[in-house]
Image (cartoon, coloured by chain):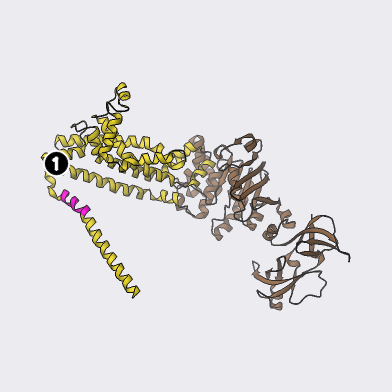
Chain colours: A yellow, B brown
Amino acid sequence: MQRSSESALTRVLQAVAAVGLVLLVTLLALPLAGLVTRIPPATLLARLREPVVLDALRLSLLTSAASTGLVVLLGLPVAYQLASREFPGKRLIELLVDLPMVLPPTVAGVALLTAFGRAGLAGGALHAIGLSLPFSTLGVVVAQSFVSAPFFIRATRAGLAAVDRRYLDAAATLRSPPSLTFFRVMLPLALPSLLAGAAMSWARALGEFGATITFAGNMPGITQTMPLAVYIALQSDLDAAIALSVLLLAVSVAVLVAVRLVPLGLALPIADARRPSR
Amino acid sequence: MLVAHLVERRGSFELNVELTAAAGETTVLVGESGAGKTSILRLLAGLDHPDRGAIRLDGDVYADVAAGVLRPAWDRDIGYVAQDFSLFPHLTVFDNVAFGLRGRGAPRREITASVDEALRLAGVADLAGRLPSQLSGGQQQRAALARALVLRPRLLLLDEPLSALDVHTRRQLRGELRALLRELPCVTIYVTHSPLEALVFGDRIVVVEEGKNSQAGSREELLRHPRSRYVAELIGTNLFVGRWAALVSGGPVVRTSDGVLALGNTSGDGPVFAAVSPTEITLYREPPESSAQNVFAGTVLELAPEPPAGERVRVALGTDPPLVAEVTEAAIAALGLREGMLVYAAFKATGVSTYM
């Protein structure tokens, strides 16, 4: 009796799970299907050749590459400190680093304005050295960096922390001081995580909308990135918006696939780094 | 010449050892796991630092806590082979071995020559292009050894270098490694839990028990004059620790916490060790009426045939103190000996060797 009621419960749960799965997949897949089937490929290509689209594409690639570079440059030391040391205020730094992930992007944009805007906290100082961030391409890069940094730092920190201490010890016994060991052992072993983090960070920067439009505005050729162009196109020309969206979708899929493939190609070293082979 | 005094407290475990080791010799640290052997190696390497003490290698001070000197591992002239070898998984065997030389900024040609020589010496010249994951355990061990030796260390530290290998590979590598170590001019410290390896490799043997070195000496000294139960067990003999005394009835005796031991012609004063070889012990099923003056009763705990042929059998006895006897198979059969049986272990006064 007990057993049969239990197995009945199991069946019900399985059924619920199956329905949930179908619904979720539909929710995720159907819009994608709509996007790619809406307009024929020929029209799509024609649309993508329009100057406003090309401008947005160029600007998006430029700014997202720049912000990813900035995030890697500034994020790597942070990730290293968080991964390898205990220090006062570490929890606070962790919170600060994670915050942009949960902060609504428009709020991030407003926050950036209050910090780096003309009347912002650091606005005067920036103005004094002839730098104006709001409503400039540089501002786009700052907004993208702000929202995308956590993705890189989190992944890189985890990768660095996963490097087995034994290898760092081995390097030390081979006359390698810690600074050299970082570049010769830690970084190569954490490389897959680092690349995955950089790719996710780049994808987040590429898709950035809220903080960018709030902080940097929407000026074609200067601050109008792809997501902004999609939004603007949507007001007047649905097909153009779709064409742009398909392009962004293709890029996103490519990043995801690349993130999956890169660690696969380097899986051997990192698997070893975590589990000593005997 | 290495001279070290190391004190390290980790929770309730305290390590406190004095260690000297000569160049051109292999000094074996032998002891059970958890005795502190690896801790000693890590302190000598500079991967950890002692709470008190000092480490001197020839004229160099590697550590002197009182003077505030604690040189990190990368600033010491050492070679270290970890128990699991710790080869860098992202580098080929060649690059692993070249790692230390490259860090030093040696010229490329010199690096290639040195690495090739080290690989040849360790017998892995043909594996230079492989990744560690493509190597067997024995090959990894050789590569790790080459990586340590290529820097020509003055202090070579080997942590259980053979224990991660299968029995066959271990046997094969043992002889090779022994020959290799014999040629090295450096101070070699070899850590093992295996008594056999200690006797094979140790020009000098230091026994580590619960964070202390309980005995140190040459192989011969250790075999002839064990000074703790643990050492006696390592080399498979029986040891009594007690004080000289004399009975009114005549002969000299050793008083131990477990009773009185009758001795041969020797006598003395103060504390004394008394060793009884397992072959000196005869087993009886009834209390013996022979001339043996020392008789202990107890049950048979274990019968273990001695390799290679097993014609002699080691018998572990639950006497007080526990004894080990070594008897022939014929004797086992004649006595009908089996585990759990009550027996009397007897040995003559002249079968006891005493030393201070």
Q: Is residue B205 visible?
A: no
Quadrant including the N terminus of chain A: bottom left
Q: Nearer the viewer, residue B115 or A186?
A: A186
Give the dominant element type of the magenta stretch: helix, strand or loop: helix
Q: Is residue A270 above or below residue B58?
A: below
Instruction: Find residue B79 and report its horizontal and vertical position in percent.
Output: 57, 43
Q: Is residue A135 above or below residue A241?
A: above
**Residue on which the image places disc 1:** A234
Amino acid type shown at disc 1: Leu
Quick check: is B31 in the magenta stretch?
Answer: no
Q: Is residue A186 visible?
A: yes
The magenta-colored residue range is A27-36
Q: Nearer the viewer, residue B126 or B283?
A: B283
Q: Is residue B218 left or right of residue B112?
A: right
Q: Is residue B301 above or below residue A249?
A: below
Binning the other alpha carbons within 10 Å of mark 1 as few (below 14), some (14 to 19) or many (20 upward) gives some
Instruction: Find residue B46 and report its horizontal and vertical position in percent.
Output: 57, 41
Number of on-image labels: 1
For image coordinates 28% across by 26% down, the residue present is A119
Q: Is residue A162 left or right of residue B194?
A: left
Q: Is residue B42 left or right of residue A92?
A: right
Q: Nearer the viewer, residue A212 or A165?
A: A212
> Which chain hosts label 1?
A
